[in-house]
Image (cartoon, rainbow, N blue to C red):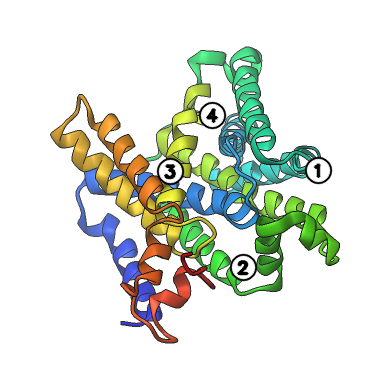
Amino acid sequence: MSGRIVALVLLAVTAALPLASAAYVVSFTVQLLLFVILAYSWNIISGYTGYTSFGHTSFFGLGAYASTLLILHAQIAWPLAALGGGALAVAVAWPLGLVMLRLRGSFFAIGMFGLARAFEALAFGWASVTQGGTGLYLPPAYDLRPIYYLLAALAFGLVFLTYRLDNSRFGLQLLAIREDEDGAEALGVKTTRLKVRAFVLSAAAPGICGGLYATYLSFIDPPTAFSPATELTTIAMVLFGGMGTVLGPLVGAVVLSVLYEVLWARFPQIYLGMVGLAIAGVVLLMPRGVLPLAMRRGWLPHGRGALRRLASRAVPAEA
């Protein structure tokens, strides 16, 4: 089965799901779409450039609060408010990228984590605007299907964007930065400009997604907007599927989301520990992720139209 047929089947199933499924299934799929969006966004900056971010929920939270405030105080329709959340995330990401991307390795990771905690503290402290720990409430949406479809469109759009990135000069330059930034710079690659561009690109979708998710919940507060658990889950999904690949974030999001639900239903007291052990095992045994390993072992079909070509543009051979 070609990748194009698989994509069409996934589109059809996603479109039909709200019309024929129970509320629980739709709610689960909304959470899945949320993590698909966050995973692909994180993959753009961390998977392709190698700059591991522990603070990408900053843009999700900023988008959620911006969208909610626009709806409450400017009476802007929620789809436009969500776009406003994305615009704020981009506006903040540009100067942040210029500063933060001068750091490398663990310094960048810790710096981004600190920024996320600073934004969370600001949301708690600026109670006159954000209502602090009480949170902001929105009028409940009577029909949640439009939010679902917009989240689905954003998720599929990111998959397509990553595919185009993987087959572009821009994507290859980002991979060169990941493999040897100093060497890439010596060859004339404008590393700072490219990193900032990738950083800004990776911030837009979480900002929009945050706005849509706040509308879906009809509520937002600092722990929801800037959750470290959401950040770590997103990173785990990309590591599981394969960093710097086209389908890795999707595979990781689907498998780990299903695993969470199954283990939570069967072992509610210890499911988080079991998921953690599973992720640790994958990282130790398959450090490049499930998808690259499957390609190296020949478990994915070969051929020009196969999913192998979509999984990763080039997978290094094992030593």
**Image quadrant for the N terminus?**
bottom left
Q: Are marks 4 and 2 in contact (CB under 8 Å)?
A: no
The residue at the far left in this view is 266
Question: How much space separates mark 4 and mark 1, taking CA atoms?
Answer: 22 Å
Q: Residues within 10 Å of mark 3 (few under 14, many from 20)?
A: many
Amino acid under disc 4? Phe
Q: From the viewer's perspective, is residue 67 above or below residue 192? A: above
Amino acid under disc 1? Leu
Q: Secondary structure at mark 3?
A: helix
3 vs 4, front mark: 3
Residue 236 badge: 3
Amino acid under disc 3? Ala
Q: Secondary structure at mark 2?
A: helix
Residue placed under numbered mark 2 in the picture? 165
Lower sequence index among marks 3 and 4:
4
Lower sequence index among marks 4 and 1:
1
